[in-house]
Amino acid sequence: MAMIQVLDPHVADLIAAGEVVERPASVAKELMENAIDAGASAITVEIAHGGMTFLRITDDGKGIPAGELKTAFLRHATSKLRTAYDLEAIGTLGFRGEALAAIAAVSRVEVMSRTADSPLGASLCLEGGQPGEVEEAGCPLGTTMIVRDLFFNTPARLKFMKKDAAEGAAVFAVVQRTALSHPEISVKFIRDGKQELLTPGDGQLQSAVYAVLGRDLALGFDPVSGSGEEIQVTGFVSKPTCCRASRNWQFFFVNGRQIKSRLLMAALEEAYANQKMVGKFPGCVLHLSMKTNGVDVNVHPAKTEVKFSREREVFHAVYHTVLSALEGSRSHPAADLTRAAVPATPVPQATTAPQAVRMPVSSSTRPSVAAPRIPPVLHVAAATPRPTPTIPPAAPVLSRPSVCENKEKPKAEPVRPVEAVDKNVDNVDNLPNPVDIPHPVQPEPVPVQSEPIPDAPDRPAQEDLSLPQQPWRVAGEVLNTYLIVEQGDKVILIDKHAAHERMNFDRMKAEGYDPMSQTLLTPVVCHLPPEEQAALLANLPLLEEFGFAAEEFGGGSILVRQAPFDVAVGEVGPTLSEIAQKLLSTGRADPAAARDELLHTMACKAAIKGGWKTSPQELEKVAQAVMSGQVKFCPHGRPVAIELTRSQLEKQFKRA
């Protein structure tokens, strides 16, 4: 058995560095938190090659005295804690005193700092955690940290690093969250000599939201403010009509610390229950202010998770604050419909619930004054009839019944809608088992005999062979979504969107996807999270194969000049965001899986949508694919059809 011994200090530092420093983004996070704790009013972050070779953070905080520079890089050296009682109420972002030691252990660090009472600053260089001599240096008030050649002495860590674009995007995401957490600090981000972010630092959260998230996303947010049980909640939440396809736009802060919390996420989304589309997630920038002894921030190595002492009160505070803002919001689609029907006479603006802050809206984009709030049904009736299509008195029936025969599979043709009303119909997960009609089974050849063999008198009828050959007919369509097919004593309901999506996917995978692309008259600017932007930019050739011509536009945006004909202009941004999410989930480990995921997306975009009016000929093609057994499930695994027998219907009507 090996002898137990104390680790070498250098090895211990490398182990500690692995817990704190995972990538350049971790370095940026720790150094920015130190700058905030030092009272900085302006922070500049500069990186090169994703932060792997160069990362500099400059602040105008209190600075570090020359005599304490070496001490600052020792393990567990901090100015933020003195006794064990201080751990019960931590009010600073950093407190363990191991960030600088961990960073210096795996990189080459240069630091320059000057305090307000010193005419000259001091500088110190460290390599692999070994400090040099402290020297005098001329520098402005505050501290400048330069980190070079990250993981130069731990090459095993380098193979886990991603491309420079992905690492730089992760650093940018950290800078964005820091800017949202402290709007009173002006934050600047420079990547490879190009400025990508600058916040005003005026103390207004709306200014930081506007600078970080962009104009389009910021205008889709409503301010919220509420308090209860010694908890105050302020910030912004997205309108129900502006929800996104992922949770990447949810930012939660507790006492100025950015955290990840399933509790807060559940409270937020519970407030949106029955107000947002299925599969969409609300965005938010929510700040919670509470007593420091009511939250434990020392439960996660990266300090990104916290534990609340009174979780129920925190949940209720967030839930009721967001719900109150949504109920008092006048930005629902009903208000837009009413606005189009109101006369041109001025209408006094109704008083809404008090809110902490108001989003800045330019004169060119400011909405007209809404009418006093009335019930939603009256809003819709006054503006325009309900968009739900009326069902004709008699469903169209094809004159000639179709027979499921074992013939060549029809090639799917592009189906163009009569009315391009995009309605997402995916709620068939809880339906009964799908129809699974096998292909016609060919009887086995009978050996040639000298005399024909007569059938036995008690031979059972081959019902399993005759079922697929029973004639069927399309009896009609309901809700512009579900086909009704009658076959013998059965009624089969087919989801035309799910079935056509599978037809498209099989055709694209078998024949290859050759999209018909169109050059956009006005290029579309898509503002995406840094991780999604990096995933798309790293797979531009793959996007070109699927009909997209995109390029980096700066400021966390992507400019799209060309898109597939099947994707509407308004769906370009959400489609790219969905593609980016799938690229992030599959990664580079399995290119075939990533390509299939993209085929799923494009097949869905090109399929008939629920709510579209479809011709009887197109409906018959979809029904033929399902009834022949060619299509059974959609690419996402949902059933495309369900079966109701005569006996099941008679039981429902109490006839059995």
Image: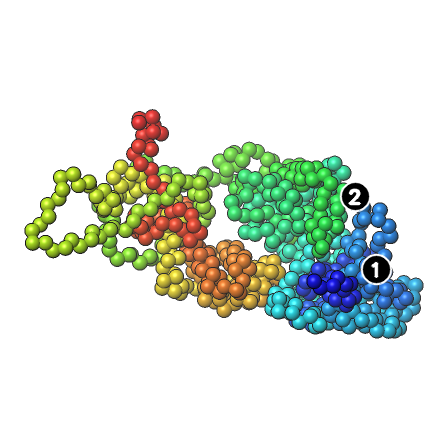
* Dot 1 or dot 2, earlier in sequence: 1
* Residue situated in front as seen by the camera: 535 or 392: 535
Q: Which residue is disc 2 drawn over?
A: 293
Residue for point 47% across, 61% down: 593
Secondary structure, mark 1, is loop
Q: Quadrant of residue 172?
A: bottom right
Q: Secondary structure at mark 2?
A: helix
**Image quadrant assignment for residue 483:** top left
Q: Kindly report which numbered mark, 1 or 2, lies closer to the viewer in this rendering.
A: 1
Amino acid tagged 1: Ala
Residue 231 to residue 32: above or below: above
Q: Disc 1 to disc 2, how far (Cα)?
A: 23 Å
* Residue 209 position within the rendered picture, expressed as x and y whole percent measured from the top left: 68, 53
> Outermost residue toward the top?
654
Height in image: 372 above or below 93?
above
Image quarter where the C terminus lies is: top left
Label 1: few (<14), some (14–19) or many (≥20) C-alpha neighbours in 10 Å: some
* Residue under label 1: 77
The circle on residue 399 is: none
Q: Residue at x 36, y 64 (%)?
A: 511
Q: Where's the N terminus, which quadrant?
A: bottom right
Where does residue 77 sit, x and y in percent of width and height? 83, 60
